[in-house]
């Protein structure tokens, strides 16, 4: 027969962590481009929700000079890089909030040319640091030109993925209950209308737009 188990553990368990946990702000080294759909299909109510969501991201994310940097673009017929005092990348929460106020509803026309957003984000990443590059797209519809293989958006997002970028979507509206974006476009998963989760960047956004929850990440 096997030996009877000991009545006490061979070593007393510790009552506290062996080392203090690393804070989110200490660990995240990432460059995040938030691409906001500003096409005319976005009504004033949805636009207000878009901006509330971006504000919650800014409040929740550990934006800092040595940590996460954030940039904003908006897209429709055209794409526009948002600047604040001549700067594209915000390295403080205050600067990110000031930059967000420069995003204008309906400023880019009626189409949803997501490919332009992806292409512009890659240009911004090419000038950024050695960090995890994350493209976060906020939209309420499918891209102009469709999602089929070889379409402009398909080519653009596959290129971003091939270059090692994190590609995440926040999808708003009932459309996405029946229509899905191609899995080849995204890093990990899409939750229709409620949230998302990244891969290497390891941060999460849940229950859009009421709550945002970033979690820690390892650097490259």
Image (cartoon, grey):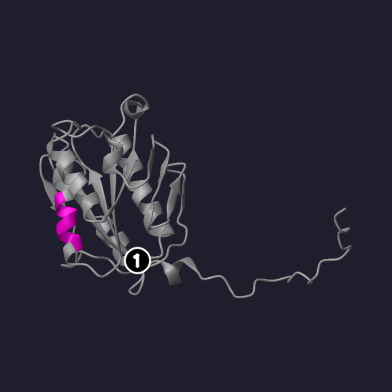
- Looking at the image, which residue is at 51% across and 71% down? 22
Tell whether 16 sits left or right of 97: right
Q: Which residues are magenta?
A: 119-125
Residue drawn at (89%, 62%) of the image: 7
Q: Nearer the viewer, residue 126 or 49?
A: 126
Check the image and name the residue furthest to the front: 1
Q: Which residue is mark 1?
A: 68
Percent x, y of residue 143: 19, 34
User: On the image, which quarter does residue 94 sit in?
Assistant: bottom left
What residue lies at 35% left-to-right and 74% top-to-bottom? Answer: 66
- Please check the rendered image and state whether residue 8 is part of the magenta-colored stretch, yes or no: no
Q: Quadrant of residue 128?
A: bottom left
Can you see residue 63? yes
Residue under the point 59% across and 74% down: 20
Which quadrant of the figure has residue 179?
top left
Above or below, comparing residue 150 to residue 12 in the picture: above
- Residue 43 percent location from the top left of the image: 26, 33
- Residue 195 screen position, x and y as percent: 42, 42
Above or below 86: residue 180:
above
Secondary structure mainly formed by the magenta segment = helix
* Residue 215 point in image, percent of width and height: 47, 58
């Amino acid at each position: 027969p096997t030996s009877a188990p000991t009545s006490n553990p061979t070593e007393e368990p510790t009552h506290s962590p062996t080392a203090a946990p690393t804070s989110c702000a200490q660990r995240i080294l990432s460059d995040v481009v938030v691409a906001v759909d500003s096409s005319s299909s976005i009504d004033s109510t949805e636009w207000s929700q878009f901006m509330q969501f971006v504000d919650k991201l800014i409040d929740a994310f550990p934006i800092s000079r040595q940590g996460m940097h954030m940039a904003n673009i908006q897209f429709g017929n055209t794409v526009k890089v948002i600047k604040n005092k001549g700067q594209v990348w915000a390295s403080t929460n205050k600067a990110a909030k000031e930059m967000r106020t420069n995003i204008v509803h309906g400023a880019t026309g009626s189409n949803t040319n997501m490919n332009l957003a992806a292409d512009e984000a890659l240009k911004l990443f090419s000038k950024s640091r050695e960090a995890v590059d994350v493209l976060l797209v906020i939209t309420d519809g499918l891209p102009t030109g469709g999602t089929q293989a070889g379409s402009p958006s398909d080519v653009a997002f596959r290129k971003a993925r091939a270059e090692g970028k994190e590609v995440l979507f926040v999808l708003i509206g009932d459309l996405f209950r029946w229509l899905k974006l191609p899995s080849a476009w995204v890093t990990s998963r899409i939750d229709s209308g409620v949230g998302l989760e990244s891969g290497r960047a390891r941060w999460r956004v849940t229950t859009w737009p009421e709550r945002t929850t970033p979690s820690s990440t390892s650097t490259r």
